[in-house]
Image: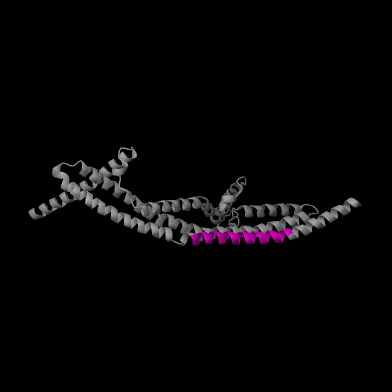
C-alpha cells in the first residue's frame, strides 16, 4: 500500500510538472505575441519563416477566401424559395386549408359509430413548389381559367395563350428544382467539405506553426535574460523549440501543398456550370416553343381585330 501511495504521488507530481510546463509555454508565447503586436520586439528578434512557407500561406488564405466568397452566394440554392415573390401570401391560405383539413379528418375519425353525420376524410394535396417559375405557372393558370370560365370565354385566345405559358413555366419550374438538387449534391456538398476539412486542416497547421514560432522567440528571450545558473536549461529549451518549429513548418508545407494541388474545386465548379447549363437549356427550349405558339395566336387575334375595325 505504501509503495502504491508513493507511485501515485510521483505520477501526480509528473502530471503537475507537465501541466505547469505547458502552462508556462502558453503564457510565454502569449506575452511574446502581445509584445510583437505592440511593437515592443525588434524585427530582427522575430524568427523568419521560410519564403516557401510564407508564399504557401498566402495562397491557402486566398483559396479559403475564394471558397467562402462563392459559397456565400451559392448556398441560396439550398433554399427552394430564394426567388419566390415575397408579396405572395399563399402560406396563409395553405395554413388555413391545413387547419380545415385537420378538423375535418378529426371529425371523420371520431364521429364513427355515433348518430352524428361523419364528414368524409380529405386527402392532403401534393405540396406546391415555392419557386418563381412555379409561381408564374400558377398565376397564368388562374388567369387562363378565369378568362375561360367567363361568358363566351371558351374560345378566348388570351386564355389559351396563358394556358400554354403556364405549361411552359411548369416545365421550367420542374427543371429549376432538379437544378437546385444537383447543385446541392454535386457542388455545394463537396465544396463545403473541402472548406471544412482540407483547407481548415491546413489553417490549423499554420496556427500550430505560429504558436511554435512564438514559443521559440519567447525561449530565446528567456535565454537572453537568463542567469548563469539557468542558461543551460534555457539553451535546451531553445533547441527543443527550434526542432519543434522545423517539424511543424514541414508538416504545414506538406498540407498546404496538398490543398493547393487538389483538383476537386475545379471539378465541383464544372458540375455547378453543367447544372446551370441544363436548366437554362430546358428554359430556352420551353420558352422558344411556347413563344412560337403564342405568336400564332397573336397574329390571328390581330387579324380578327383589323377585320372587325374594317367593318
Report the residue at 34% width, 39% height from top: 37
Residue that appears at 62% across and 57% down: 173
Instruction: Give residue 132's position: percent from left, percent from top.
Output: 62, 52
Q: Quadrant of residue 31?
A: top left
In this rendered view, identify the residue nearer to me: 14 or 67. 67
Q: Give the answer, above or below, for where 125 lies relative to 48.
A: below
The percent position of residue 214, horizontal first and vertical second, equals 29, 46
Left or right? Give the position of 297 relative to 203: right
Magenta span dominant secondary structure: helix
Q: Which residues are magenta?
A: 266-291
> Percent position (x, y) of residue 258?
39, 60
Q: Give the answer, above or below, for where 88 lies relative to 119.
A: above
* Position of residue 228 measured from the top left corner of the image (x, y, whole percent): 14, 43
Q: Residue 226 versus residue 286: which sits nearer the camera?
A: 226
Q: Is residue 177 magenta?
A: no
Q: What residue occupies the far right of the structure in this picture?
A: 311
Rendering quarter of residue 126? bottom right
Amino acid at each position: 500500500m505504501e509503495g502504491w501511495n508513493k507511485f501515485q504521488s510521483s505520477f501526480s507530481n509528473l502530471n503537475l510538472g507537465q501541466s505547469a510546463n505547458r502552462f508556462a509555454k502558453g503564457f510565454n508565447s502569449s506575452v511574446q505575441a502581445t509584445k510583437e503586436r505592440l511593437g515592443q520586439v525588434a524585427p530582427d528578434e522575430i524568427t523568419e519563416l521560410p519564403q516557401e512557407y510564407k508564399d504557401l500561406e498566402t495562397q491557402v488564405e486566398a483559396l479559403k477566401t475564394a471558397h467562402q466568397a462563392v459559397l456565400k452566394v451559392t448556398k441560396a440554392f439550398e433554399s427552394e424559395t430564394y426567388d419566390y415573390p415575397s408579396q405572395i401570401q399563399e402560406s396563409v391560405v395553405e395554413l388555413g386549408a391545413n387547419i380545415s383539413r385537420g378538423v375535418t379528418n378529426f371529425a371523420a375519425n371520431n364521429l364513427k359509430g355515433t348518430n352524428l353525420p361523419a364528414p368524409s376524410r380529405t386527402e392532403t394535396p401534393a405540396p406546391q413548389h415555392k419557386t418563381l417559375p412555379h409561381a408564374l405557372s400558377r398565376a397564368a393558370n388562374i388567369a387562363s381559367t378565369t378568362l375561360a370560365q367567363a361568358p363566351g370565354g371558351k374560345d378566348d385566345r388570351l386564355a389559351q395563350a396563358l394556358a400554354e405559358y403556364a405549361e411552359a413555366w411548369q416545365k421550367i419550374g420542374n427543371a429549376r428544382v432538379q437544378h437546385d438538387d444537383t447543385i446541392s449534391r454535386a457542388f455545394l456538398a463537396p465544396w463545403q467539405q473541402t472548406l471544412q476539412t482540407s483547407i481548415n486542416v491546413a489553417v490549423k497547421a499554420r496556427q500550430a506553426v505560429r504558436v511554435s514560432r512564438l514559443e521559440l522567440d519567447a525561449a530565446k528571450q528567456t535565454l537572453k535574460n537568463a542567469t548563469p545558473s539557468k542558461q543551460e536549461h534555457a539553451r535546451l529549451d531553445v533547441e527543443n523549440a527550434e526542432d519543434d518549429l522545423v517539424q511543424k513548418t514541414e508538416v504545414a508545407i506538406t498540407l498546404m501543398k496538398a490543398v493547393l494541388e487538389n483538383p476537386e474545386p475545379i471539378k465541383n465548379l464544372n458540375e455547378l456550370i453543367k447544372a446551370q447549363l441544363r436548366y437554362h437549356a430546358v428554359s430556352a427550349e420551353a420558352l422558344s416553343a411556347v413563344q412560337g405558339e403564342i405568336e400564332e395566336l397573336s397574329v390571328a387575334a390581330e387579324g380578327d381585330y383589323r377585320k372587325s375595325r374594317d367593318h
